[in-house]
Image (cartoon, rainbow, N blue to C red):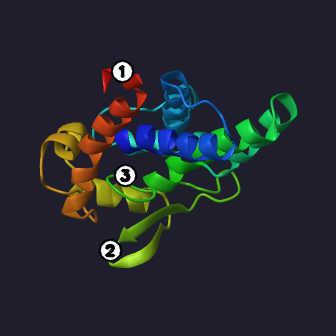
Amino acid sequence: MFEHFLAGELIFILFGKIFGLDITPEFLLLGAFCGWFPDFLSFFLSKRVKYDKWFHSHRDNFSHTIFLPLIVFVILCFSVNLEWALMVSLAILSHPILDLYGIGWGVQLFLPFSDDIYKIFYRHKIIYIFDNEEARNADVEKYQTNNWFKRAYFSFKPCRGTPWWWLLLEWPSLVLAIYLVLPINWR
């Protein structure tokens, strides 16, 4: 979850430098929000978000597809400019890409055209495709605990298919994301 903030900020830093934009704390906060935006949007699109072991279901809507960044890109190209459209769209795209890996249970990248659920580096395969939601939910039932947040962020027991070192990325990502948005004179 926290790596989404950092990914959005890093994309804004990279493209902000390329496009010669002023990189301020507010600019980086916008990048962090764009990296997290699919989860924010999902709460409005999903009618079944629960905070238990079924929390992965928040990814089962249009917010976590590759088509959302494309639509945002087109809208921003016409309403703002190409530079901002590229930065925002790539920050949004980083979210489902990161959700393919890590503690999540996969993403429906091509929804509404395909219901396949993709996950990378799972069950000793580079790309694993759950046949349907029932197949994924069977794995969730078998391997996940009721309190996913506690297990993911406060325990060193990795979730099924997730290497132990992935858990080490979460909290440092949050710390670095916060550090980057602090004004220079506060660092």
Residue 138 is situated, as x and y percent measured from the top left of the image, at 33, 59
Callout 3: SS: loop
- From the image, tell me which residue sits under label 2: 123
User: Residue at position x 84%, y 28% from top?
Assistant: 79
Q: Look at the image and tell me whether residue 92 can be seen.
A: no
Query: What number is the disc on residue 185?
Result: 1
Q: Residues within 10 Å of mark 2 (few under 14, many from 20)?
A: few
Could you say where residue 29 lies in the image, as x and y percent from the top left?
49, 26
Visible residue check, residue 80: yes
Lateral position of residue 97 relative to residue 55, left or right: right
Q: CA distance from mark 1 to mark 2?
A: 47 Å
Q: Residue at the location (55% across, 31% down)?
A: 23
Amino acid type at circle 1 is Asn
**Which one is nearer the viewer's eye here, 117 or 124?**
124
At horizontal 65% and vertical 34% (from top left) the residue drawn is 21
**At 71% from the left edge and 57% from the top edge, which residue is drawn?**
113
